[in-house]
Image (cartoon, rainbow, N blue to C red):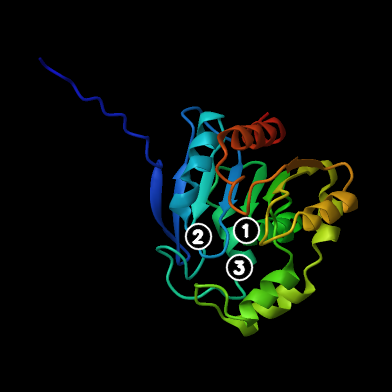
Amino acid sequence: MSSSLTRDDVAPPDEEGMHDGLAYALFTPSAPARGGVVVIHGADSRKENHYDWGRECRAAGLAAVVYDQRGHGASPGMLDGRVLDDVAAMAALLPPGPVGLRGSSMGGFLALTAATRLEARAVVAICPAPGDLLLRGLRQGRFGFPADAAALEPLLAQADLEAAASHLGDALLLLHATGDDRVGVEHSDALHAAAPESRFIRVPGGDHGSIQHDPELRGEAVRWLAARLLP
């Protein structure tokens, strides 16, 4: 009696490297792409945890760059006042064209905060953490990554996410689980109230990480991005 084994390899990123001190992975579709999506992970995460978003964007015809923030994964140093410059540096790796931002938790904060500077055509914010919550966590030492607190505090203290959401309007997609006990859903409720034209997917139950890699919700978000970024 014979048996056979099958193996399915998941396609890797199309390019990996270092840029401006940041480790990144670039996903590019087979057809030429215009613009694309910067995927920004949350506190104490790393780029490989979000390759599913890179692959989904690539399959939808979008380029995507996923990167390790400073002090995370393969990016050395510590998170500091360059965080918004880093988002811009990653966006520069995408093909010329419209830019979308996708961020989760701390990455959601950065996506919203960087949107105006990058003239983002679309922003997906998943359980976005407000600046005061991040500032509290930083001061209380609740994060595992090295950080230059003095350089980060002005950004975290002064950022106005509701104003950023209002500016984006219908170019904002919010996703939040009502069972999130780390970043309460009321924070996304407030962002949606500030930008009533935005789309808000409010998911019953779940927790802080449950939405990030849910295949159905990821697919819905990528289709929304493609509708706004592709010609």
What residue type is disc 1 on?
Answer: Gly
- Tell me: 138 left or right of 17: right
> What residue is drawn where x is 72% and y is 79%?
154
Q: Mark 1 and mark 2 in contact (Cβ < 8 Å)?
A: yes
The numbered mark at residue 107 is 1
Q: Earlier in the sequence, mark 2 or mark 3?
A: 2
Q: Quadrant of the C terminus?
A: top right
In this view, the residue farthest toward the left is 1
Label 3 element class: helix
Image coordinates for residue 223, horizontal then vertical, percent: 65, 31
Query: Depth-wise, is mark 2 or mark 3 nearer the camera?
Result: 2
Neighbor class of circle 3 (other Cα within 10 Å; few <14, some 14-19, many 20+) is some
Q: Mark 1 and mark 3 in contact (Cβ < 8 Å)?
A: no
Work out how far the residue at label 2 is from the one at label 1, CA to CA, in angstroms. Answer: 10 Å
> What residue is drawn where x is 50% and y is 72%?
145
Image coordinates for residue 19, horizontal then vertical, percent: 45, 60
Work out how far the residue at label 3 is from the one at label 1, CA to CA, in angstroms. Answer: 10 Å
Query: Depth-wise, is mark 3 or mark 1 nearer the camera?
Result: 1
Image coordinates for residue 116, horizontal then vertical, percent: 76, 56
Q: Which residue is mark 3?
A: 83
Quarter occupied by residue 151: bottom right
Q: Is residue 22 above or below residue 127?
A: below
Quarter occupied by residue 42: bottom right
What residue type is disc 2 on?
Answer: Ser
Quarter occupied by residue 4: top left
Q: Which residue is mark 2?
A: 45
The numbered mark at residue 141 is none
Work out how far the residue at label 2 is from the one at label 3, CA to CA, in angstroms. Answer: 15 Å
Label 1 element class: helix
Image coordinates for residue 99, horizontal then vertical, percent: 65, 45
Neighbor class of circle 2 (other Cα within 10 Å; few <14, some 14-19, many 20+) is some
Q: Quadrant of the N terminus?
A: top left
